[in-house]
Image: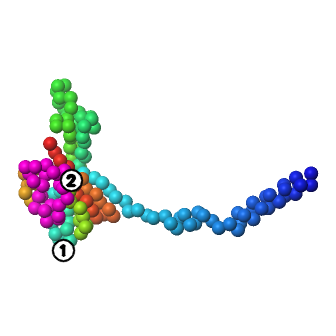
Amino acid sequence: MQVYRFSKVLLPVLIIFNLLFMPSTTTNAQSNKTNHPKIEETTAYITSFKKTNGKWVGKFDYIQWYFGKDADKEFLKDCNCSKEMDHAPDGYYIRNVNPKIRTFTISNSATYILQTFNPYEIKWNQKVTRAQFVSFLKDRNQHHYIPFHIEIQNGIVTKITEQYIP
């Protein structure tokens, strides 16, 4: 009985002692935490892309890009079509309801990816230089809008990818 009483008193004392004098692991875990920058991904038309005061600046008109079943669903929401029209033409649908144009600085190390750099040949995810991208915009974007997927990190555009339209 003596041992039972002794362990009943000693065990809580040992637990409290360990809690008080053991190094905390939560402070180490918090100090090793890395804050990753928030990356915003959106789809937009590029309305302007030029060098201003030594920096490249783009103006973007955000759009909603839908593909496949989502395109059909969103198309039918917006369309006042006859019953024969039960899906989005060409399998995609673009909605552009917000007229706000957003302006962003373009990173000096931004990545530019095109699908139709050569208008006569589709080459998927072709990485091009900024100069090639600017030339592409001048040649193609005058006659119709091309959607681009944009990645923005801390308010700076870091990646622009052309969305292929069939």
Instruction: Identify the residue position indicated by label 2 in the image.
Output: 125
The residue at 20%/43% (across/down) is 94
Residue lying at 22% horizontally and 44% vertically, measured from the top left: 95
Q: Position of residue 109 (x, y in %)?
A: 25, 67
The answer to whether 27 appears left or right of 127 in the picture is right
Residue 93 screen position, x and y as percent:
21, 40
- Pointer 1 and pointer 2: residues touching (CB < 8 Å)? no
Residue 89 located left or right of residue 21: left
Magenta stretch encompasses residue 88:
no
Farthest residue toward the top?
Answer: 83
Amino acid at dot 1: Asn
Task: Identify the magenta region.
Answer: 114-137
Q: Secondary structure at mark 2?
A: loop
Tell me what residue is drawn at x 58 percent, y 63 percent. Answer: 26
Residue 100: image quadrant is bottom left
Residue at the disc numbered 1: 53
Is residue 118 part of the magenta span, yes or no? yes
Q: Nearer the viewer, residue 106 or 120?
A: 120
- Indicate which label's residue lies in the foreground, 1 or 2: 2
Judge left or right: residue 34 versus residue 78. Answer: right
Mark 2 residue type? Asn
